[in-house]
Image: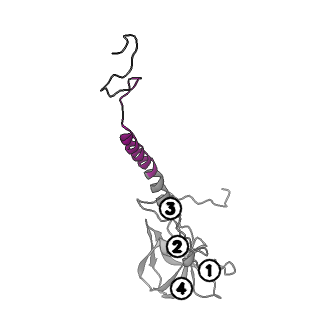
Amino acid sequence: MRPSGKRGPSRGTTSDACGAPYTPPVMRSRWHALLRTALAAPVLLALGCNANLYDPKLATRPYPEALQQESVVQVQVVPLQTQIRFINATSTNYDNVDVWINRRFVKHVERLDAGQQIEIEIEDFRDQWGQCPQPGGFWRTRPPTPIVITQIQRDETQPLVGLVTVLPPDVKVNSRDPR
């Protein structure tokens, strides 16, 4: 029998001296494991979804700075969510050309016939380090790379040919014109 002035757990109760419910050690370890898993899952998910679009095995050559752009042709370049649409509105066929985006990313195109429309995945364009532009779409983790300049390179000696890039309304391009 306990003295009448002391409080504490009596035999058969499930609370400690402070009145908190008693939790067996096995249950505590399960709750701790569950809590650790719940806290680690978002961190691991964020790290996994934030991976760089970088693959050194897919690295290409650097942009040909020595070649100047001589002309612009009516081949429209329309950036889509995860693809780029090329619409050749000219009477010229382009065979075995390299298409440059933003003076950085390149993709070899076998054929773009007169009047033809093709779509190429944005992730197929790579730079000299193997990185690709960031595509858009619902599952993206970063802002998409704006496509602002597109050029065709026919060979190592001829000047580059500019294409008409259709800019989305939300892309702002800084102009050098002070007006």
The numbered mark at residue 61 is: 1
The CA distance from mark 2 to mark 1 is: 24 Å
Q: Amino acid at mark 4?
A: Val
Label 2 crowding class (10 Å Cα cut-off): few <14, some 14-19, many 20+? some
The numbered mark at residue 164 is: 2
The range drawn in magenta is 16-40
Label 1 crowding class (10 Å Cα cut-off): few <14, some 14-19, many 20+? few
Q: Which residue is pictured at 32% across the width and 28% down the height?
A: 14
Of badges 1 and 4, nearer the viewer stands 1
| Depicted 126 relative to depicted 174: above or below | below
Q: Which residue is pictured at 50% across the width and 77% down the height?
A: 74
Location of mark 3 (residue): 144
Nearest to N terminus: mark 4 or mark 2: 4
**Total residue callouts:** 4
Q: Amino acid at mark 3?
A: Pro
Mark 1: which secondary structure? Answer: loop
